[in-house]
Image: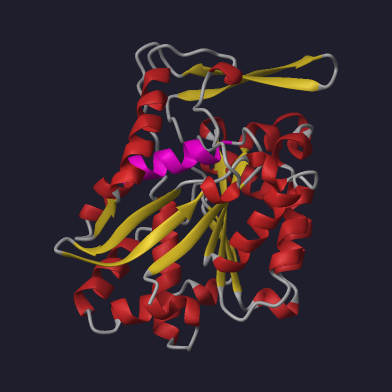
Amino acid sequence: MNKELKITMLGASGVGKTTLLTSMYEQFEATTKQANLHLKPDIETAAILDKYLGQLKSLTYEFKADERKKGIRGTAATAGPESLPSYIFELGKPEKASFKLLFRDYPGGYVLPSDVAGRRFIHKLLRECAAVIIAIDTPAIMELNGRWHQLRNRPDEILSLFKTAYQNLNEPRLVIFAPVKCETYVKDEASAEQLIWRIKEEYAPLLEFLQQPSRADKVAVVTTPVQTVGCVVFWKIEVENFSTPRFYFRKTSFNSKYSPQDSEQLLRYLLRFLLKAHLQDKRWPMFDIVRQAFSPDAELKQAVELFAKGCKKTGGFAILQGQDLLNI
């Protein structure tokens, strides 16, 4: 039996999917150890993400305000979608892995209708994956009343993808809205609430689709803002040729260092969702590996439950739909 549970990133080019995945990797091991869990990347995953992590950390020493001169190079598929790497993490107790979490990333251009092969690949992922992490360029959705949101985050294309892939759901899914580059917008509870409001407003058509009766009890939706760098804040936008925005950022102080925050929250919500799927004890083939891992192993289930209880509920973190799919 396949012992891999799949999760996919989703987002347009340059939104920060790969940076988000890298910051998640940076915090996974430290936070899971606190709950006596073991989350270990395979050799290829560690090699790729260590390279990206080095690039991210170096940016805080030689920081360029223009976002086009910062960040890590986006994912590329040199030989088509099937050539893209998978990021695999073994999950279990320290002495024994119980199953694997497989994260998929891909070029952001795949969300565009013009890339037929790329769209087909994403459709397949959305059907196969238990969870979807939608990376959101936060300044684009927040600044100037969201003037550049459509261009940067492509919500209409993302809605179209969901409408195709989520027509006939037989098993539960978790959809995570993950605002990145959000350091400026989670400074206090008032600004964080404004971020949630903007997500609800700008992604209203997608939320309405997921709330339709045929899906409402099968899809959990949460917001989890992630400070992928931690030491920079939004500064300004300049527009070239009246159509191309350039987003600028600045460091919080001259000596500030790479310090991502809350990227482990995506894993906490994911494991909370998986544990609930196990506790419901329904015959969902996608979750057979979870049932087989948790049923005979009370210590593993207890460790996952302890870790999942660390899910934040304030500061931009919220359950928008499917509370029953996350209650443990």
- Residue 88 spot, x, y in % from top left: 37, 54
Q: Residue at x 59, y 39 (%)?
A: 191
What is the residue that sits farthest to the front in this orientation?
79
Quadrant of the rendering where the N terminus is positioned: bottom left
User: Is residue 215 rendered to the left or right of residue 94?
Assistant: right
User: Is residue 95 rendered to the left or right of residue 39?
Assistant: left
User: Is residue 101 rendered to the left or right of residue 321?
Assistant: left
- Which stretch appears magenta? 16-27
Q: Residue at x 36, y 81 (%)?
A: 291
Q: Is the stretch drawn in magenta largely helix, strand or loop?
A: helix
Q: Is residue 26 magenta?
A: yes
- Residue 12 spot, x, y in % from top left: 67, 41
Q: Quadrant of residue 15?
A: top right
Front residue of 165/192: it is: 165
User: Is residue 216 rendered to the left or right of residue 96?
Assistant: right
- Residue 24 spot, x, y in % from top left: 40, 44
Q: Quadrant of residue 69?
A: top right
Front residue of 230/128: it is: 128
Q: Is residue 102 magenta?
A: no
Task: Establish if 19 lies above or below 25.
Answer: above
- Residue 187 spot, x, y in % from top left: 50, 34
Q: Residue at x 62, y 42 (%)?
A: 136
